[in-house]
Amino acid sequence: MNQTSRPRPAARAIIWHRSAWFESLQFVVLFGLLLALTIHGAQSMDYQWKWEKVPRYLYRVIDGELIWGPLMKGVFVTLDIAWKAGILAMLIGLATALLRLSGSIVGTALSWSYIEVIRNTPILVQVLVFYFIIAAVLGIPREWAGILCLAFYEGAFTAEIIRGAIVAVRKGQREASQSLGFPTVDMYRDIILPQAVPLMLPPLGGIVVNLVKHSAIVSVIAVFDLTTQARTVVSDTFMAFEIWLTTAALYLVMTIALSLVVAWLERRCKVH
């Protein structure tokens, strides 16, 4: 029997489940330590906890009707911003990556300039410039200004991920398709991109998770996302610890859910 052979699928599944449980245990322990540290800090400040008032800012039931509180309304706005910006970021990243690989001097220069400018300037500065200058001139609504700015910001990183995955596809695949007379569009659509998707999927999952976290930056232009709603509630109630811990937990739920979906898609691609 070959001792260097790969583990069987059942053994790989057991290893994966053990690793997942161990990582989950590490996360629970770390979160517990951070929570205990927060509680200890609040007690040293003689802080009066008001957790019983937090649910009203998540939801209310009035006359049998469910009414979402400001924090949950902020969650819905955050998710709306994230999925719209995510789709636009993928399209911008794909176009930029193909433009950079096109061999055109102008296309390569434009795509390189866009990527370098976006990646080497703070996102806060980009949001302010985009909102107060570009959006004001073009008449773009506040929410769409935030969405477009996030899309262009993440699109620069997405472009490099897609370009790296395309370059990683074996050169012989491109040469074989060209020798068979495939047009460039068909070559990328039917041969190159299907092989590049499994390579780019894990880092693209990180882009999607980052979109949810980075969407908090739109609070500086008064878009009523989760961070803006939490800031408003804190200013009205002075329950800083309770509201910000609840807000962090809501972001955590969203990002973990997205990470699990991306992990499932990655496993599906590996199976196929």
Image (cartoon, rainbow, N blue to C red):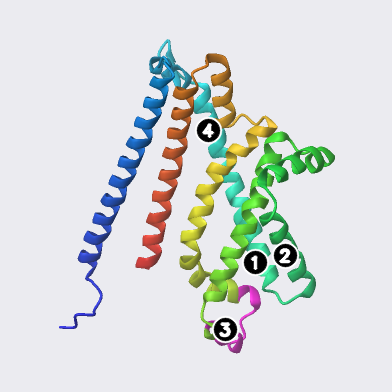
Q: Quadrant of the C terminus?
A: bottom left
User: Which mark's residue is nearer the viewer, 1 or 3?
Assistant: 1
- Earlier-in-chain disc, 1 versus 2: 1
- Earlier-in-chain disc, 3 versus 2: 2
Q: Under tag 3, what secondary structure?
A: helix
Residue highlighted by disc 1: 97
User: Which mark's residue is nearer the viewer, 4 or 2?
Assistant: 2
Residue in the image at 51% along x and 81% along y = 170
Tag 1–tag 2 contact (CB < 8 Å): yes
Up the image or down, 99 lies above or below 181; here it is above
Q: Is residue 145 left or right of residue 39?
A: right
How crowded is the residue under tag 2: few (<14 C-alpha within 10 Å), some, or many (20+)? many
- Earlier-in-chain disc, 1 versus 3: 1
- Earlier-in-chain disc, 4 versus 2: 4
Residue 136: percent from left, percent from top: 81, 37
Residue highlighted by disc 4: 76
